[in-house]
Image (cartoon, coloured by chain):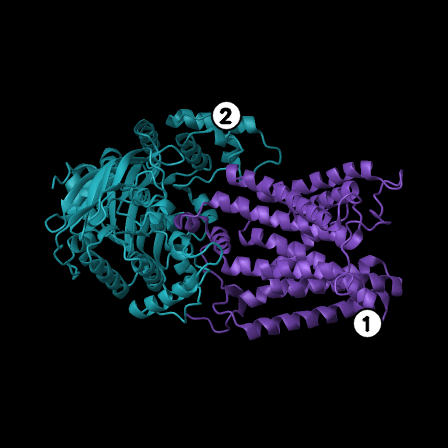
């Protein structure tokens, strides 16, 4: 029996511990159709697709392929069903050619006839309009060429349901157009295509239907022809949730940090921060919004002296003292100048803390340089660790327990506690409540507010717009490394910020 | 088509232990050693028909049976311990220095060169200072070269340090051509056998007194250096997470180079001890695999330099005992290596049960 749907998901649920990543999701794609799956970061898009391709196994729900219920326990089960996923991070062997990568892992005659393989690849390429050289080695290829190899690999294996996880994130506009042309050809040839994205304009340009996820929940599916940027934004950010977060009025804010025209380029040559400028005031919380990877990390790290800057200037205004330029200083030089700049990075146990070390050693990450030439002082950090455990009510067997063994909320309290212990003048936090339960989250909000009232300039990168709107005084919005605007958090709406995040809006103008 | 049947629960389940308990760790290790001795006994009876108790007695006799044997065991323990202590900073930094062998050898070569060319010309204090300095410097250079490449171009340090071992061996072969004594023997022979210039003298009446003092001092120093010094913390941060090290403002490249300089230099010093304090000669096999055995010692001791004292003694003990039973019971020396192998297998293997627990499938399945 053949159903009209190439693939259909019914009531799919996936939990990771206490977190529900996918909550009873329904989704369907027809053959000869492009479905866009739209959602903010952490809305469960990738988790859902990983269940179709066999990387995760759903806790509840059913998957139907061409009308038949199937069990997909591993990617090996997904291949015979014609399901192929193209991941954000390519899974190719660098030293092999395109053709070799494409047949790698396939069974077949003992003697490999690579010319026959190449011919078949060229036929596929001609059919769909790919540009591919079967004999080129992967390490000589551009990102876009590698992506083509991944797609051809799936088609070569007979996939007719293709899932692409944010395929345009790594492409230039021209490459994106070429990809879209190919995807349309594939659709017209009767393949079902699912594309994960958070770029609204691409959704409108390419897809036939759009399914929207929000915080692990299925919001709905609409025909693209009837959707607009505004209607999709509204579905994507959800309706306004009132949060009971305290927001004291800022007390005489003063300029603390000015960033002018800062541009950062990562080692791969991609511009991560594009002529960013803004001003942060002491005594206020400046929220930083944007879809993940829009330059938030580079913004904070360039201030902290951890990321080299191509150009631009960062000025620091200490309280009651003359301005100092810190653009060219490294993290150590900044701290040597007595500038108290604290940073709670996104990657808590991979960057801010060392999971296998105890609390004292983790306190020392900031303080080990103090004192004489040889000996590292362990006494002050021990006192500090005990003090933080007491004041922030950290649940731990003791100061010598490795911090990696603590719960997520306690890990974050250790990190935030250490960073605010140095009485900072600028406090930068990235995703401070990610993965935390509600009580721990409120503890962190309170800590940030206390710092704000002390006159600290707080920079808070967040992903939950409701929280940013309730907690911050102003919100800076980033899109593709550019600052698309700064809005007043007391008056702005989620839709307004959502549009600025996806570049379609005209900016806040506050 | 995909299998539509339900997933079978596996027969057993392996999970990491959440809490480390010292009594359990000690108990598991004791059981492992007992099991190893029992298995060794079975193997001995099956292969040779000898009484395993007698064979064990022979091992003890060979290692510590007389004052001379005891001191040879101590001397070799010290050499192994020094190499293990020397490579520890590198391993703490997760720099896989498998080039201890070459660093020891090149340090030994530098020592021998000073002894041969300047042995009879310099007063003893200056001579020793020069020998020690040369061995430290040579080992340091051998350690820093791979570190420079690692820091600059992120080359693989395991392959690099390993290849440096062969280069060191070739350099020794080359030097032997010039230092041959007597001519045509293709070996260096005892250096300064008449004047004993550059031989470490006895200390407090002990032949290997200086060896003991030098090695114990360095063992204690590295313990303190890694645990309590600023540089020790930098090494630990770089080893645990390069990102955290960067976040802390540590210059990772500097730390890699500096740490390998220390590691290499101390390996070079082990070369000095082997030439000046033990063999008084040099050959391509002088390091005797200590650079590799030391890695086993370091990791078995979880990079704790004081535990290394015990582990290197045990390994040397077994090695010396092996030689004894080989001659006493006219066994092939490989037989004793089998015993050492079995013991190591159990001791290393039991770490698994200290870190993980195995749970078998429950009889009653939940619905």
Q: Position of residue A94 (x, y in %)?
A: 51, 35
Q: Chain of mark 2?
A: A
> Left of B282 or right of it: where is B7?
left
Q: Image point 40% across, 56% down: which residue?
A: A370
Mark 2 residue crowding within 10 angstroms, few (<14) / some (14–19) / many (20+): few
Q: Secondary structure at mark 1?
A: helix
Which chain is in purple here? B
Q: Is residue A496 visible?
A: no
State the quadrant of the C terminus of chain B: bottom left
Residue bearing mark 2: A119
Residue A294: image location, x then y, percent:
28, 41
Question: Quadrant location of residue A155?
Answer: top left
Q: Is residue B51 left or right of residue A236?
A: right
Q: What colour is chain A?
A: cyan
Tell me if residue A104 can be seen.
Answer: yes
Picture quadrant of residue B346: bottom right
Q: Secondary structure at mark 2?
A: helix
Instruction: Quadrant for residue B148, please give it.
Output: top right
Q: Position of residue B175 (x, y in %)?
A: 77, 38
- Residue A73 on image: x %, y %: 44, 53
Residues tagged by mark 2 and mark 1 found on one chain of the structure: no
Image height of B202 relative to B270, above or below = below
The residue singled out by tag 1 in the image is: B57
Relative to B351, does residue B98 appear above or below in the rendering? above
Within-10-Å neighbours for mark 1: few <14, some 14–19, many 20+: few
Front-lying residue, B166 or A339: A339
- Chain that bears disc 1: B
């Amino acid at each position: 029996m053949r159903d009209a749907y190439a693939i259909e998901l019914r009531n799919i649920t996936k939990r990771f511990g206490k977190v529900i990543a996918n909550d009873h999701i329904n989704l369907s794609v027809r053959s000869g159709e492009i479905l866009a799956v739209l959602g903010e970061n952490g809305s469960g898009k990738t988790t859902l697709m990983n269940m179709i391709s066999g990387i995760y196994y759903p806790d509840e729900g059913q998957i139907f392929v061409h009308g038949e219920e199937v069990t997909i326990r591993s990617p090996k089960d997904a291949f015979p069903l014609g399901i192929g996923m193209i991941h954000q991070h390519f899974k190719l062997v660098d030293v092999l050619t395109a053709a070799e990568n494409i047949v790698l892992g396939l069974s077949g005659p003992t003697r490999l006839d690579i010319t026959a393989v190449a011919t078949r690849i060229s036929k596929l390429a001609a059919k769909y309009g790919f540009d591919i050289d079967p004999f080129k080695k992967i390490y000589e290829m551009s990102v876009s060429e590698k992506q083509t190899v991944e797609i051809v690999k799936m088609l070569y294996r007979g996939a007719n349901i293709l899932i692409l996880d944010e395929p345009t994130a790594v492409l230039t506009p021209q490459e994106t157009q070429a990809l879209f042309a190919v995807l349309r050809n594939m659709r017209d040839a009767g393949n079902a295509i699912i594309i994960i994205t958070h770029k609204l304009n691409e959704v409108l340009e390419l897809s036939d239907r759009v399914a929207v996820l929000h915080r692990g929940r299925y919001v709905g599916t609409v025909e693209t022809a009837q959707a607009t940027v505004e209607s999709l934004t509204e579905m994507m950010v959800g309706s306004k949730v009132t949060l009971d977060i305290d927001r004291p009025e800022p007390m005489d804010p003063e300029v603390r940090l000015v960033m002018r025209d800062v541009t950062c380029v990562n080692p791969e040559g991609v511009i991560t921060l594009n002529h960013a400028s803004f001003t942060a005031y002491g005594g206020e919380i400046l929220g930083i919004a944007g879809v993940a990877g829009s330059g938030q990390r580079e913004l904070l790290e360039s201030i902290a002296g951890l990321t080299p800057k191509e150009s631009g200037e960062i000025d620091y205004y200490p309280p009651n003292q003359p301005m100092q330029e810190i653009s060219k200083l490294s993290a150590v030089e900044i701290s040597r100048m007595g500038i108290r700049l604290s940073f709670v990075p996104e990657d808590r146990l991979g960057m801010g803390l060392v999971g296998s070390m105890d609390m004292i050693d983790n306190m020392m990450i900031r303080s080990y340089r103090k004192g004489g030439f040889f000996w590292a002082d362990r006494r002050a950090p021990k006192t500090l660790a005990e003090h933080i455990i007491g004041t922030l009510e950290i649940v731990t067997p003791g100061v010598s327990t490795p911090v990696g063994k603590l719960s997520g909320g306690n890990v974050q309290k250790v990190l935030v506690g250490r960073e605010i212990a140095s009485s900072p003048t600028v406090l930068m936090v990235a995703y401070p409540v990610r993965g935390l339960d509600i009580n721990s989250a409120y503890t962190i909000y309170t800590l940030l507010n206390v710092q704000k009232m002390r006159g600290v300039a707080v920079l808070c990168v967040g992903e939950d717009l409701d929280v940013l709107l309730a907690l911050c005084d102003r919100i800076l919005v980033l899109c593709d490394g550019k600052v698309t605007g700064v809005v007043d958090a007391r008056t702005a709406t989620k839709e307004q910020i959502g549009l600025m995040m996806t570049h379609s809006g005209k900016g806040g103008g506050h | 088509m995909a299998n539509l049947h339900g997933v079978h629960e596996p027969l057993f389940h392996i999970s990491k232990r959440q809490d480390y308990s010292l009594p359990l760790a000690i108990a598991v290790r004791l059981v492992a050693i007992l099991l190893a001795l029992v298995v060794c006994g079975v193997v001995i009876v099956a292969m040779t028909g000898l009484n395993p108790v007698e064979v064990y007695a022979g091992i003890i006799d060979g290692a510590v049976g007389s004052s001379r044997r005891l001191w040879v065991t101590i001397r070799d323990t010290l050499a192994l311990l020094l190499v293990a202590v020397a490579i520890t900073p590198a391993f703490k930094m997760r720099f896989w220095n498998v080039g201890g062998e070459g660093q020891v050898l090149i340090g030994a070569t530098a020592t021998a060169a000073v002894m041969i060319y300047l042995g009879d010309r310099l007063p003893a204090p200056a001579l020793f200072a020069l020998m020690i300095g040369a061995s430290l410097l040579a080992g340091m250079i051998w350690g820093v070269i791979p570190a420079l490449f690692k820091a600059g171009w992120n080359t693989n340090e395991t392959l690099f340090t390993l290849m440096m071992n062969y280069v060191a061996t070739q350099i020794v072969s080359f030097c032997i051509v010039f230092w041959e004594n007597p001519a045509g023997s293709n070996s260096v022979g005892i250096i300064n056998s008449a004047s004993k210039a550059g031989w470490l003298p006895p200390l407090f009446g002990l032949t290997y007194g200086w060896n003991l003092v030098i090695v114990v001092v360095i063992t204690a120093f590295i313990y303190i250096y890694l645990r309590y010094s600023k540089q020790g913390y930098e090494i630990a941060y770089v080893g645990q997470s390069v990102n955290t090290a960067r976040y802390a403002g540590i210059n990772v490249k500097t730390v890699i180079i500096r740490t390998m300089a220390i590691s290499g230099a101390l390996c070079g010093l082990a070369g000095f001890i082997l030439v000046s304090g033990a063999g008084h000669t040099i050959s391509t096999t002088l390091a005797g695999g200590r650079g590799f055995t030391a890695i086993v010692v370091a990791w078995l001791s979880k990079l704790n330099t004081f535990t290394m004292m015990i582990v290197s003694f045990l390994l040397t003990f077994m090695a010396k005992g092996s030689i004894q039973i080989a001659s006493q019971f006219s066994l092939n020396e490989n037989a004793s290596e089998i015993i050492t192998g079995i013991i190591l297998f159990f001791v290393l293997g039991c770490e698994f049960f200290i870190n993980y627990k195995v749970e078998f499938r429950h009889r009653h399945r939940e619905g």
